[in-house]
Structure formats: structure tokens, C-alpha cells
Amino acid sequence: MSGSSSVTAMKKVVQQLRLEAGLNRVKVSQAAADLKQFCLQNAQHDPLLTGVFSSTNPFRPQKVCSFL
């Protein structure tokens, strides 16, 4: 690795570190509380919790039509 490419790589690293240092951080406890509140507010719309009506389920088994 030459000297100029090493300097360029280090400048990119410093730029990335400055960008990350400027980000606003949220405490894990606050993020977890916000996530819990969001999940509780939207639980009635979650098909994994409430289920899916068979009439609106796109993955239900198709009925077979047969003639005798």
C-alpha cells in the first residue's frame, strides 16, 4: 500500500468516525420502551396475533372444481 493511498484511506476512516460521533444516540431502555409501546398500540392490526380471515387469506388452499 503506498503512502498516498494509506492517507486517503485514513481520511475516509476519520470522516466516517466524525459522522458516527455526530449521531444522536438513544438509550437502550428508552428504545425498548418505545418499541413496546408501538407493539402494544398496533397489536390489533397484527395478523400474527389476531389471525387472518379465511376469506381474505391469499394463501388458503384453492378449492378444486370437479364435474361428475
Image (cartoon, helix red, strand yellow):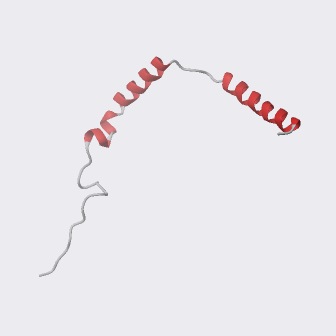
In this picture, is 52 found above or below 10? Answer: below
Identify the residue shown where x is 11% and y is 82%.
68
In this picture, is 46 found above or below 31? Answer: below
Q: Can residue 22 be seen?
A: no
Name the side, left or right, on which 27 lies relative to 33: right
Name the side, left or right, on which 68 lies relative to 26: left
Q: In which quarter of the image is the N terminus?
A: top right
Q: In which image quadrant can residue 37 be found?
A: top left
Name the side, left or right, on which 49 lies relative to 19: left
Spot the residue most to the bottom.
68
Query: Where is residue 58 drawn, in percent x and y?
Result: 31, 57
Spot the residue most to the front.
1
In this picture, is 67 found above or below 11? Answer: below
Q: In which image quadrant can residue 16 be found?
A: top right
Identify the residue shown where x is 32% and y is 34%.
43
Identify the residue shown where x is 30% and y is 41%.
48
Query: Where is residue 13 drawn, in percent x and y?
Result: 74, 31
In this view, the residue in front, 1 or 65, is 1
Identify the residue shown where x is 19% and y is 74%.
65
Please give the count of numbered marks on the rendered protein. 0
Q: In which image quadrant can residue 40 be found?
A: top left
In this view, the residue in front, 38 or 22, is 22
Q: Can residue 17 be seen?
A: yes
In this picture, is 14 found above or below 65? Answer: above
In this view, the residue in front, 27 or 14, is 14
